[in-house]
Amino acid sequence: MSESAHDAVVVGYDGSPAARRAAHWAAREAATRRRRLVIVHAFRWPLTELTQLRTEALVLSEDPFRTEYQKLVDDLVEECRPLAGGNEVKGELTPGEPVDVLNRLGAHANLLVLGSSGHGAVHQVLLGSTSAELVRSVDAPVVVVRETDHPAHHRRVVVGADGSSTSSRAVDFAYDYATRHDAELVAVHAWSDLPLDALAPVREWDVNWDEITEQAKLALSENLAGHSAKYPDVRVRHIVTMSKPVEALLEQSQNADLVVVGSHGRGAVRRMLLGSVSQAVLHYAKCPVAVLRAT
């Protein structure tokens, strides 16, 4: 593991505009966290592609590629230094596949930041193969940045709270972000994963919906109680809704700086049947998304 990446804000950089925006976001976030910023480019020497070229004389040298990649990283380091609040900014050119390199460095990072897509339209549709893999495997919090490199324009952070241990980790992350950025915290509890149409027959039963709603509100308050005591200055708005979690989070994220979700907080069977809430939010949210896995 790179010693400089330990407990630092680490951002992956592949030369794309999305990755540059992510680096700018990461630099500003490193400033508020008072952490080092490490910009990492995973150097993959394109030997396979080069050997497929049918030329009479082909010099397979790593140096031209390494020199070009190093210049990209060095230029971005200089861009990010004024944004990092005086914290150390370092660039690293590391041999290896991006997923492997960032998995290794992210294991001991304070935060791992990624761009929303790699190169090309297909990657944009699929979120980006590197990002999609890392949010499933890295234990450190992962933020996927899209649209903006400014971490606190609206001063509003949205978090999904379902009472699970993973959700509790996400809530703590959201409170910490809110207090550092003087942002309002919107805590969303969507108490049913069923579509509203499926609830129509249930509504005909003799059910006290007001009581159920109050119980959900109480559950949300209990979920936030310990965090509220730790961060008493954070303004919190509670949202209890019958919408599906993805719909509720995306609706509240329209004017947010960040959406925070816990990954895999509700069990493997439900993930298989419904799809992961965190993956859906990552695909469709228009603001940066933070994903926290169960440790």
Image (cartoon, rainbow, N blue to C red):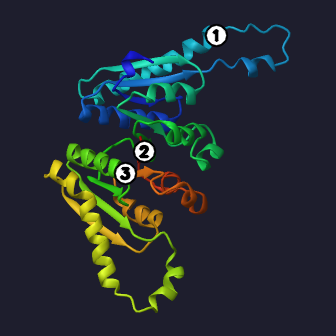
Q: Amino acid at mark 1?
A: Glu
Q: Which residue is mark 3?
A: 165
Q: CA distance from mark 3 to mark 2?
A: 7 Å
Task: Find out whether the residues at labels 3 and 2 contact each other: C-beta distance under 8 Å.
Answer: yes
Q: Amino acid at mark 3?
A: Ser
Q: Nearer the viewer, residue 190 or 92?
A: 190
Q: Which residue is mark 1?
A: 62
For residue 4, which quarter of the picture?
A: top left
- What residue lies at 55% left-to-right and 61% top-to-bottom? 270
Q: Which residue is mark 2?
A: 294
Mark 3 or mark 1: whose residue is earlier in sequence: 1
Q: Nearer the viewer, residue 63 or 101?
A: 101
**In the rendering, which numbered label is found on residue 36?**
none
Q: Relative to 54, is 135 above or below?
A: below
Task: Find out whether the residues at labels 3 and 1 contact each other: C-beta distance under 8 Å.
Answer: no
- What residue lies at 20% left-to-right and 46% top-to-bottom? 179
Q: Left of 89 or right of it: where is 67?
A: right
- Tell me the crowding category of disc 1: few under 14, some 14 to 19, or many 20 or more residues within 10 angstroms, Cα based: few
Q: Relative to 286, is 73 above or below?
A: above
Q: Quadrant of the C terminus?
A: top left
Mark 3 or mark 2: whose residue is earlier in sequence: 3
- What residue lies at 21% left-to-right and 42% top-to-bottom? 180
Q: Quadrant of the N terminus?
A: top left
For residue 26, which quarter of the picture?
A: top left
